[in-house]
Amino acid sequence: MGLNLTYAYGQTPLTAEELDDLIIKSISTRGELDEFEQQNIFRRFYF
């Protein structure tokens, strides 16, 4: 992938394969991915 990402304590980095499969390239941790997915679910049911 070529990025030199740094992670805060407790963040779980995504594997290179997982990063390549992402549509939203600014997501780099499982926590960010979980938050993004949760926001999409919320928008789907409440808007």
Image (spheres, helix red, strand yellow):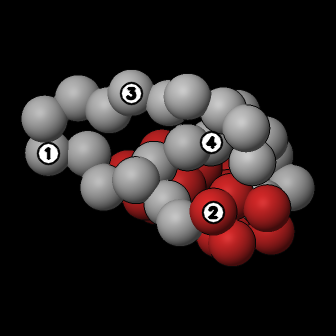
Q: Nearer the viewer, mark 3 or mark 4?
A: 3
Residue at 63% x, 62% y is 16
Image quadrant assignment for residue 9 = top left
Q: Which mark is residue 16?
A: 2
Residue at 55% x, 28% y is 4
Q: Which mark is residue 32?
A: none
Question: Mark 4 or mark 2: which comes first in sequence?
Answer: 2
Question: Mark 3 or mark 4: which comes first in sequence?
Answer: 3
In space, the residues marked 1 and 2 are separated at their CA atoms by 19 Å
Type of the residue with mark 2: Ala
- Kindly identify which residue carries mark 4: 27
Identify which residue, 26 or 1, lies in the foreground: 1
- Kindly identify which residue carries mark 1: 10
- Within 10 angstroms of label 2, few (less than 14), some, or many (20 or more) residues? few
Q: In the displayed structure, would residue 7 be above or below residue 36?
A: above
Question: Mark 2 or mark 3: which comes first in sequence?
Answer: 3
- Within 10 angstroms of label 3, few (less than 14), some, or many (20 or more) residues? few
Residue 31: tell me if it is visible.
Answer: yes
Left or right for 7, reference 40: left
